[in-house]
Amino acid sequence: MKIVKKAVYISITLTIAGCGSDFGPLSSGVSLEGTGDPTIGSMPPMTTDNLIEISPDEYILESIGRVDQQCSGVKLSMQLMAPLTLVELDIGYGYPVNLGEIEDNRRVGVVISVENETTSTLYNFSESCQPLLELKNNNDEKQSLSFDFECTNQDSVVILKPGENLKYKYVFTLPNGDLERDVVYTHRYSLENIKKFTERDSCEITYPLLLKN
């Protein structure tokens, strides 16, 4: 297991918003990228300076690398990231999580990528300005993560040209004392700017949160 202590992250960001919820403080960032652009943000080489000691009372949240899901015209990807540095974590990397009362010790970061694989314009919707991001336990019970985003319309809409990539970054807090959790993201999209929620296409991706001690 490789434990991340510190790293440097550089990002070109279009929108950043901070908010709060029942899960503790939450934050998000959005960036838009096209094909052929260099990757922004990378994992630094591991040295002894990057490693830290883990107390017996703490868990390690371990990355399984990137998870991909393809739907009609859309490719979704989700990957664990360090909540403080926003560095995407490759498989085998992780960081300490303490499921006690202190919310800052229970923070989780994920980065979600949406790629337009069609030859047409793709409309990407966040209904009521909220990402459809949920936590699911072993009983398939889901809890929504609510963000205090503000928008003038019912939706926020991001338009992707063919081959363009949309990247979301979210940081949230795990519920206290719950070990078994998956992060579930549902993406709403369409090839037309459809106003009715029920007529939009959807694509779901799940990322398991592996807590080890």
Image (cartoon, rainbow, N blue to C red):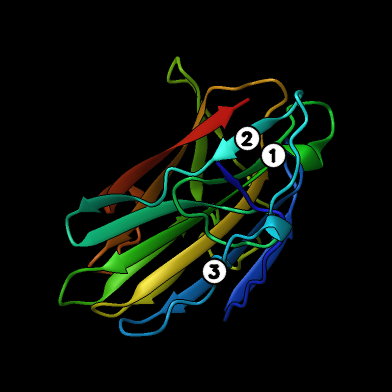
Taking the spot 60% from the left edge, 22% from the top edge, the residue there is 179
Secondary structure under the numbered disc 3 in the rendered image: strand
Give the vertical position of 59 relative to 88 (above or below): above
**Do the numbered discs 1 and 2 sit on residues whose CB atoms are within 8 Å?**
yes
Q: Nearer the viewer, residue 60 or 189?
A: 60
In the image, taking residue 203 as reference, residue 140 lies left or right, namely: right
Q: Nearer the viewer, mark 3 or mark 1?
A: 1
Q: Earlier in the sequence, mark 1 or mark 2?
A: 2
Look at 28% across and 54% down and name the residue there.
Answer: 200
Work out whether 97 lies above or below 108: above
Residue 169: which quarter of the image? bottom right
The residue wearing badge 2 is: 60
Q: Secondary structure at mark 1?
A: strand
- Crowding around mark 2 (Cα neighbors within 10 Å: few <14, some 14 to 19, many 20+) is some
Q: Amino acid at mark 2?
A: Ile
* Residue found farthest to the front: 48
In percent of width and height, residue 89 lies at 52, 55
Tag 1: Cα neighbours inside 10 Å, few (<14), some, or many (≥20)? many
Q: Residue at x 57, y 81 (%)?
A: 12
Residue drawn at x 63%, y 21% is 178
User: To which quarter of the image does residue 166 belong?
Assistant: bottom left
Residue 2 in sight in this render? yes
Near-viewer residue (130 or 101): 101
Which of pointers 2 and 3 indicates the residue nearer the eye?
2
- The mark found on residue 30 in the picture is 3
Question: Which disc is residue 96 wearing?
Answer: 1
Task: Choose the circle earlier in sequence order: 2 or 3.
Answer: 3
Quadrant in which the C terminus is drawn: top right
